[in-house]
Amino acid sequence: MAITAGMVKELREMTGAGMMDCKKALTATDGDMDKAVEFLREKGLATAQKKASRIAAEGLAMVMVSEDGKNAVAVEVNAETDFVAKNEKFQGYVAQVAEQALETSAADIDAFLAEPWKFDTTKTVAEELAGQIAVIGENMNIRRFAQVKEDAGFVASYTHMGGKIGVLVDVVTDVVNDDIKEMAKNVAMQVAALKPLYTSDSEVSAEYIEHEKEILKAQIMNDPKESQKPEKVIEGMITGRIKKELKEICLLDQVYVKAEDGKQSVAQYVAQVAKANSANITIKGFVRYETGEGIEKKQEDFAAEVAAQMGN
């Protein structure tokens, strides 16, 4: 039976499911509207779409590392409330998402959602997500994932605040022992706590530096006292402030949080551990996921919501 746009529209209005899901349901049921509704309900898609407008900004940032330490992944899966994020069922589901993401060859989240769910290959990852939404009862979202592979060393991981922050650190080293693993974990904790943007200043683009210089110059020129200083002095001030900023945003230039003297940089700490273990160590990169980062959270007034529901 030919599936028309009108049929898709009707089913969408009945269920709130997406257009492509409605078309798929109608095709699978040979155009039978009632069976198509049941199809969507069984897949959890009707329920999922009705919840899709609700903001999912809580959840978990989970990291997973293979047994040999060579492969790792960070994933962020969102839910609407912190209550659900602490739920064992939700946490178990996120662990499955991480396990799938550890092995995926998908290049982006859309391709990841479209691939077969490894724990039940009759479903896609997106269909399993929809089913979880129906069971758990909140809007959920697999927001992002990042794989890290390191054959010339290992990947260290750290989870902070029960999954609010997940960190992976890519370590290139010719020696792997407990001291070096501890160093890597300490660096991962540094990433979690101080939120660097880059591994080293070599990653910072010239465009970023020029943009920051323009901002700093504008700040100086807007200051009645500083703007009167000679051009050479102003240039020196800008250079000094740029260097200070880079020490804050570049991991290896940051002051190591556990430094006893309060001065040792992360790079110096890594070098110290490398020397003590006769190793060559390079911190190649890192991934830092913070749950809900950049998502505008809805401010709930629960008292008003309850009153509205009760007709007060």
Image (spheres, helix red, strand yellow):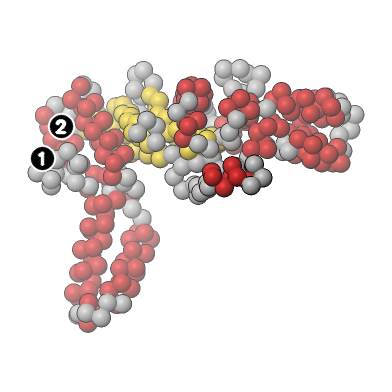
Marks 2 and 1, how far apart at CA: 15 Å
From what the image shows, is residue 262 above or below residue 32?
below
From what the image shows, is residue 116 above or below residue 306?
above
* Residue lying at 21% horizontally and 69% vertically, measured from the top left: 237
* Residue lying at 48% horizontally and 25% vertically, measured from the top left: 87
Q: Which mark is residue 260?
A: 1
Q: Is residue 165 left or right of residue 81?
A: left
How dense is the environment of label 1, judged by Cα within 10 Å: few (below 14), some, or many (20 and up)?
Answer: few
* Residue lying at 31% horizontally and 72% vertically, measured from the top left: 219
Q: Is residue 113 left or right of residue 44?
A: left
How dense is the environment of label 2, judged by Cα within 10 Å: few (below 14), some, or many (20 and up)?
Answer: some
| Helix, strand or loop under label 2 | helix
Foreground: 280 or 246? 246
Amino acid beneath label 1: Glu
| Helix, strand or loop under label 1 | loop
Q: Which residue is mark 2?
A: 273
Q: Quadrant of residue 69?
A: top left
Q: Where residue 262 appears, x then y in whole percent?
A: 13, 45
Amino acid beneath label 2: Val
Q: Residue furthest right?
A: 1
Foreground: 182 or 94? 94
Q: Residue furthest left?
A: 261
Q: Where residue 37 appears, x then y in whole percent?
A: 79, 28
Residue 165, visible in the rendered structure: yes
Q: Where residue 247 appears, x then y in whole percent?
A: 23, 52
From what the image shows, is residue 166 above or below residue 294?
above
Observer-side mark, 2 or 1, equals: 1
Residue 148, visible in the rendered structure: no
